[in-house]
């Protein structure tokens, strides 16, 4: 039958060094390279989710040094995004606090724009258990309180968790479009 191609704009946010680029590259190439450099980029990737072709546009953002810039950029990013992935590292508590601020800012801005971009919160670097400073429970509670879905993954160790995040977000985007 005729199938309409679905586009999904996905925005990755979070502090520096948490694995935003690692997640993006793992999803697109299935590989973990290790070093990604400081590039801001929008990647296009086609993948099949539940038997349907999805055209992904993935904005792998850079965390700005200047917080004034953070405010102005995020408005533009939020207009663009159909869904957001907020990433922290389980061994970097300050990155968890960045996600807490970002999720609140997004929810606040979305209310003003009367938009409801679904958000997935990701605790990355699960392989580094011995250096963990953010418990799974804290991540889960933050997600619960902001009506987000939560995953703990390791972009370094497996493709599977990364796939669950991106495909999970597609499901949420479809749900939110059906409600509009
Ligand atoms: P970004 O600044 O958020 O884009 O972070 P990057 O994707 O560049 O990753 C920052 C560093 O963390 C790099 O050295 C990656 O190799 C490393 N990294 C990313 N994901 C993982 C992970 O799941 N486990 C471990 N151990 N290291 C990771
Ligand atoms: Mg990066």
Image (cartoon, rainbow, N blue to C red):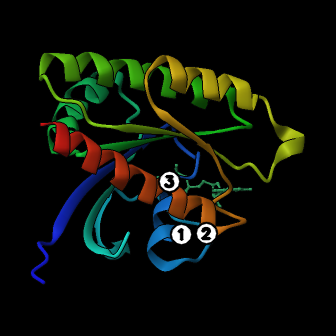
Check disc 1: other Cα within 10 Å, few if <14, some if 14-19, many if 20+. Answer: many
Q: Quadrant of the C terminus?
A: top left
Task: Measure the alpha-carbon separation of dots 2 and 1.
Answer: 6 Å
Q: In this view, does 105 lie above or below 16?
A: above
Occupied quadrant, residue 161: bottom right
In the image, taking residue 134 as reference, residue 5 lies left or right, namely left
Q: Is residue 180 visible?
A: yes
Helix, strand or loop for disc 3: helix
Task: First in sequence, mark 3 or 1: give its number.
Answer: 1
* Residue indicated by mark 2: 159
Residue 25 sits above or below residue 72 on the image: below
Mark 2 lies on a secondary structure that is: helix
Is residue 22 visible in this depiction of the protein? no
**In the image, residue 144 lies at what x, y percent?**
53, 22
- Which residue corresponds to mark 1? 26
- Disc marking residue 165: 3
Going from N to C along the chain, the mark reached first, 3 or 2, is 2
The residue at 71%/37% (across/down) is 90
The answer to whether the residues at label 2 and label 1 have Cβ atoms under 8 Å apart is yes
Ligand number 1: quarter of image: bottom right
Residue 178, x across and y down, in percent = 18, 44
Tell me the residue at 58%/47% (across/down).
17
């Amino acid at each position: 039958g005729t199938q309409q191609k679905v586009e999904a704009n996905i925005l990755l946010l979070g502090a520096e060094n948490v694995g935003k680029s690692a997640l993006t590259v793992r999803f697109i190439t299935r590989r973990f390279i290790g070093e990604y450099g400081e590039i801001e980029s929008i990647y296009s990737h086609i993948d099949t989710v539940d038997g349907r072709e999805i055209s992904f546009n993935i904005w792998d953002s850079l965390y700005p040094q200047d917080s004034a810039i953070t405010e102005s950029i995020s408005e533009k990013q939020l207009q663009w995004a159909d869904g957001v992935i907020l990433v922290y590292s389980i061994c970097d508590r300050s990155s968890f606090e960045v996600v807490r601020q970002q999720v609140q800012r997004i929810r606040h801005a979305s209310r003003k724009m009367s938009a409801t971009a679904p958000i997935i919160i990701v605790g990355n670097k699960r392989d580094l258990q011995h250096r963990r400073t953010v418990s799974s429970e804290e991540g889960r509670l933050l997600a619960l309180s902001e009506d987000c879905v939560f995953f703990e993954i390791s972009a370094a160790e497996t493709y599977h968790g990364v796939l669950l995040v991106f495909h999970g977000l597609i499901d949420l985007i479809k749900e939110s479009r059906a409600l509009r």
